[in-house]
Amino acid sequence: MIKLKADYVLTMNKTYDILKNAEVLFDKEIIDIGYNLPEKAIYLGKNSVLMPALINSHTHLEFGSNKTSLNYGDFITWLESVIDKREELFVSCKADCYKNAIKEMKKSGICAFGEISSSGTDLKYLKHSPLKVVYFNEIIGSNPAIVDAMYQDFLNRLNESIKLKSKNFKPAVSIHSPYSVHPVLMDKIIEIAKEKNLPIEAHFMESRAERRWLDKGEGEFKLFFEKHFKNAKPLIKPLEFLKKFKDTNTTFIHCVYANEKELQKINEIDGKIAHCPVSNRLLNVGKLDLEKVKNYTIDYSVATDGLSSNYSLNLFKEIRAALLMHTDLHPKYLAKDLLKAVTINAAKSLNLNNGSIEKGKDADLITFQLPDNVENIENLPIQIILHTNEVERLYINGEKI
Ligand code: BEZ
Ligand code: FE2
């Protein structure tokens, strides 16, 4: 058993309790939180913070070798560059590339991540990850001629990942997007997710091009599909797409162009949203309307996306970017929500038993010290986001990593 004592303990529980000079007692799980608990305390020092470790709900480590290869500034131009460079980037992402990605996440206090795997090449590098992995086997392919082959390949990858299922490695599924997956495949994969109780992730309404294509069959995606697939008809309406995910635990990635009816539907099916502000900025698609999302009871997480559309996998940097980008929201209250977004909300997306300091939760914790005292505790979330890049300690299942 370990007992840590910090100047500030952020529980991220339902009432967002922040305790001053408090203690947390844990082994693999959190045993108790409070004052004068049994065991000798390890005091974490002046201006120390103890909080749940962060969770990166959406990454693409397969693209980890990208630094300067891809074209930013426009969604379709970026997508074309991804298609162009995909194989090259995958081949050049070997052991060191995955190690570096995990090292960066670990240093910045991330205990778990949701990995979108489109090829399965990442499996051998991630199966012994020191961080928890929720491994989303992704299906992509709208061309009817290749549906069967894509499905078989998906099943093979899924089965390989299921064999590795453990407390720290959880298989899951991903449907790339409403524009890139044939509806027949969507149905098959959602059936599997329901049967095996697997979380799902799907990109949704990331760009204006996607909006135009799915609504009207027009715009830049029309040219894109004519060029690559000689197929110029969208196969599903956005609302029909969302309805398919009823009775699943699905996180919709981006939702920048989701309209009111679609947000309502996401809310109705208890869907989650992952917001990737840096990725959205680099592809110049705008940003998620957090004010609108907050009118619903939709839990949103904040994630980095992959290094295919980011320069870093550090979640403190990501939420700092969010804090500075959402100029329509009050920074003090936004900061509070952003810390929830990378802890408890992300845990809900990934079906993990962590993300808050409460009895019975996994002891996935981080500690760090602020540069100075924070007098009014209301300012703690914003000061944490402004002044933290790396953590001092990271515990996963109660073990110091
Ligand atoms: C498709 O198969 O439809 C597709 C694949 C990659 C990007 C976009 C669409
Ligand atoms: Fe993504």
Image (cartoon, rainbow, N blue to C red):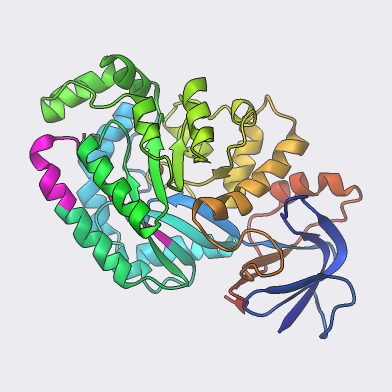
Residue at 61 percent across and 44 percent down: it is 319
What percent of the width, then of the height, locates residue 171? 37, 62
Vertical position of residue 366 compared to residue 70: above or below: below
Work out whether residue 147 or residue 47 is closer to the camera in this orientation and state it: 147
Q: Name the quadrant where ligand 2 sits.
A: top left
Q: Is residue 314 in view?
A: no
What percent of the width, then of the height, locates residue 280? 47, 33
Residue at 39 percent across and 74 percent down: it is 128
Left or right: 140, with 386 as reference point: left
* Quadrant in which the N terminus is drawn: bottom right
Question: On the image, which quarter does residue 373 sit in?
Answer: bottom right
Magenta-drawn segment: 134-151
Question: On the image, which quarter does residue 395 sit in?
Answer: bottom right
Work out whether residue 116 or residue 36 is closer to the camera in this orientation and state it: 36
Vertical position of residue 133 compared to residue 69: above or below: below
Q: Is residue 394 in view?
A: yes
Work out whether residue 7 or residue 67 is closer to the camera in this orientation and state it: 7
Left or right: 358, with 263 as reference point: right
Left or right: 272, with 34 as reference point: left
